Amino acid sequence: MRCSRCERPAVVDQPYRSAHLCGPHLLASVEERFRREMQRQLPGVRGGTIAVALSGGKDSAVTLHLAARYFRRGAPVRLVAVSVDEGIAGYRSGTLEAAATLTSQLGVEHRVVRAGERLGTTTDVAAVELGAPPCSYCGVWRRQLLNRAARDAGADALLLGFNLDDLAQTVLMNLVRGDLDRLARMAPHRVRQPDLIPRIAPLAQVPEREVFLAARLAGIPFDHGECPHAHRAVRNRFREIVWELEETQPGTRQSLLRTHERLVDLLLRTEGSGAPARCRACGEPSTGEICRACEFLLLVRPVAPPETP
Ligand code: SF4
Ligand SMILES: [Zn+2]
Ligand SMILES: [Zn+2]
C-alpha cells in the first residue's frame, strides 16, 4: 500500500478519512492535528506557564514532545511536566524513569508528586483495603494531584495526553451512565473555574494507534509497561465496543466527540457553568460537600476534619 500523499510505502491506514500515510506524512499529520487543537482549545497564548501531565507512557510523551516544539516557535512559554506516582509496584517506576529521560532530553522542568506523601495512601494499599476496582479512585486522586501540582507551578493550563480513543470511550461511558454532569466536566475545558486549571487535550483528534506509531517513528522515549490493575478497569469493555463500532462504521470516534461538543454547548447555554463548591475536608473545588477524592480517602484512612472558626 502506498502513501496517499507520496510514493513511499504506507505505515498506517486511516479508514475514517480513506487515506494511508507513510512515516514522515504520519508524523506531519499528527503534529498538524496537535497544532490545530492547541489553537482551538487554547487560543492566544502569549507567555506564562503551561503544565503537561506526564505519565511516561506514549500519549503523554508525545504530548510533551509536540508541546515543546509548538512553543519553541511561538510565544516564550515555560513548560512544566508533572508526573504522579500513585504507588503501583512494578509499574510506575519504569514510566517515571522514561518521563525523566524525556524531560532531560527536552530541558523541561519535571515535578513528581507522590500519592503516598500527599494523600497518605497509595493505589496499591487502597486496592487491598477496598477490594473495589482501583481505577475509580486512582483516577480521581491523580486528577486532583495533577490539578494541585499545575496550580502550584502557576500554570495557566494543563495539557493531557488523552487521544481520540480515550475521549470517545469516556464520552460513551458517560452517555451510557446518563451522567451529563460528568460529560460537561470532561476535558477539554471551555470554562475557567476558580482553582481548577483548564485541562486541554491536544491529541483529541489522533487515534491511539497513530500516537503509538508517531512516538516510535520520532524516537520519543516512553515506557511500554501496563498497570497491573488495568485488567479490572470498567473502561476495557467500552474500549472493545468503540473498536467494534469503529471497524464497522469508521468515524464513530470522531462522531462521539462531536456529540460531546454539542451537548456541552447545550448544557452551557441552558444550565451555565455553575461554579464548584469547596470540599469541606480538603478545600479543593468540588461538586458536593465532600470531593470524590476525599470520599475515597475516608474509606481507607480518616481525613482530618475541617477546622471550625
Ligand atoms: S490503570 Fe487504573 S489503577 Fe492503573 S494507573 Fe491507570 S487508573 Fe490507576
Ligand atoms: Zn507520504
Ligand atoms: Zn476533598
Image (cartoon, helix red, strand yellow):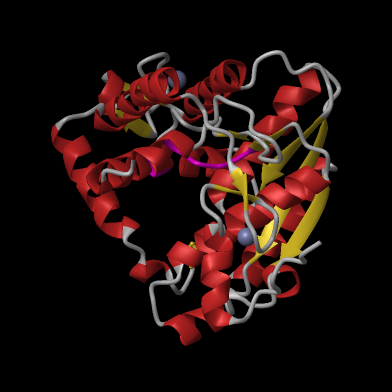
* Residue 70 is inside the magenta segment: no
Residue 224 shows up from this direction: no
Q: Is residue 180 left or right of residue 140?
A: left
> Residue 258 at x, y = what percent?
34, 23
Quadrant for the C terminus, please: bottom right
Q: Is residue 125 left or right of residue 154?
A: left
Q: Residue furthest left?
A: 248
Q: Nearer the viewer, residue 276 or 229?
A: 276
Q: Is residue 256 left or right of residue 111?
A: left
> Residue 129 at x, y = what percent?
49, 86
Q: Residue furthest bottom?
A: 128
Picture residue at 57% right of the left edge, 72% below the top = 297
Q: Is residue 96 left or right of residue 91?
A: right
Quadrant for the N terminus, please: top left
126 w.r.t. 167: above or below? below
Quadrant housing residue 47: top right
Picture residue at 53% right of the left edge, 32% below the top = 274
69 w.r.t. 59: above or below? above
Q: Nearer the viewer, residue 83 or 278?
A: 278
Q: Nearer the viewer, residue 179 or 288?
A: 288
**Start and end of the magenta stretch?**
159-167
Q: Quadrant of ligand 2?
A: top left
Residue 25 shows up from this direction: yes
Picture residue at 42% right of the left edge, 25% below the top = 271
> Residue 10 at x, y = what percent?
37, 29
